[in-house]
Image (spheres, rainbow, N blue to C red):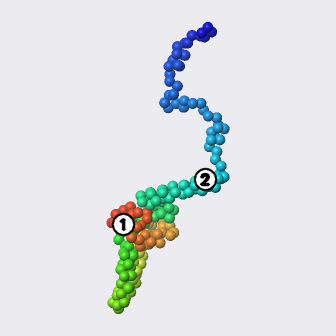
Amino acid sequence: MLFTRKKTLNDELADAVPQDRPGAKNKPTPKRRDQEAARRQPLVVTDRKVAKDIEKQKRREGMAKQRQAMVTGDDANLPVRDKGPQRRFIRDYVDARWSVGEVVLPIMVLVLALSFLKTSWALMAVFVLTYGLIAVAVIDAVLMWRRIKSRLIAKFGASGVPSGVTMYAVMRAFQLRPTRMPKPQVKRGDYPS
């Protein structure tokens, strides 16, 4: 205490202020080389087992996001074949209407059961139901596609019909509504504008 100086008012105020202030950094700035070393990761993981586990985890997360997008219709995480406003328009249009293609599978189960009967009327019914239903479903799909195409051109312009969407629409129309993926986002009769 012999060679100490008296504390001034500024020294007393500095001691009274708490050191950990909310919103402040409250620590010294780290050196650049330490930060770069902390961020540095090898391009190729040397341990193959760890690399395989990391890749598997990333794949699982990606697939989980994709499955969720298939249920909710989130365009950002959908697979490439389902992305885009034109494909969403096609999905919504197909889901809004009744298609003959939807009933093909259930009726074909009935036709299969009829084919086990060896009577002449059952075989004739199998023939008529099989080929008649397929012909009606194809005609319905062609008419549906012509309507969708004209609406796509009206909404998105002449270049609004990308390649491959014809089969996309037809295959969706031939699926049972509850089994369609991505799940239908519109009710029947709610056609997109």
Q: Which residue sits at x=41%, y=71%?
A: 175
Q: Is residue 7 visible?
A: yes
Query: Which one is closest to the eye, mark 1 or mark 2?
Result: 2
Q: Which residue sits at x=41%, y=78%?
A: 138
The part of the image, by quadrant, that contains residue 139 is bottom left
Question: x, y percentage for residue 124?
Answer: 36, 89
Amino acid type of the residue tagged 1 in the rendering: Ala
Q: Which residue sits at x=62%, y=39%?
A: 35
Which is more toward the observer, 145 or 131? 131
Question: x, y percentage for residue 9?
Answer: 52, 13
Question: x, y percentage for residue 10?
Answer: 54, 16
As helix, strand or loop, the secondary structure at mark 1 comes to helix
Residue identifier under label 1: 96
Amino acid type of the residue tagged 2 in the rendering: Val
Count of numbered labels shown in the rendering: 2
Which numbered dot is residue 132? none
Quadrant assignment for the C terminus: bottom left
Residue identifier under label 2: 50
Residue 43, placed above or below residue 185: above
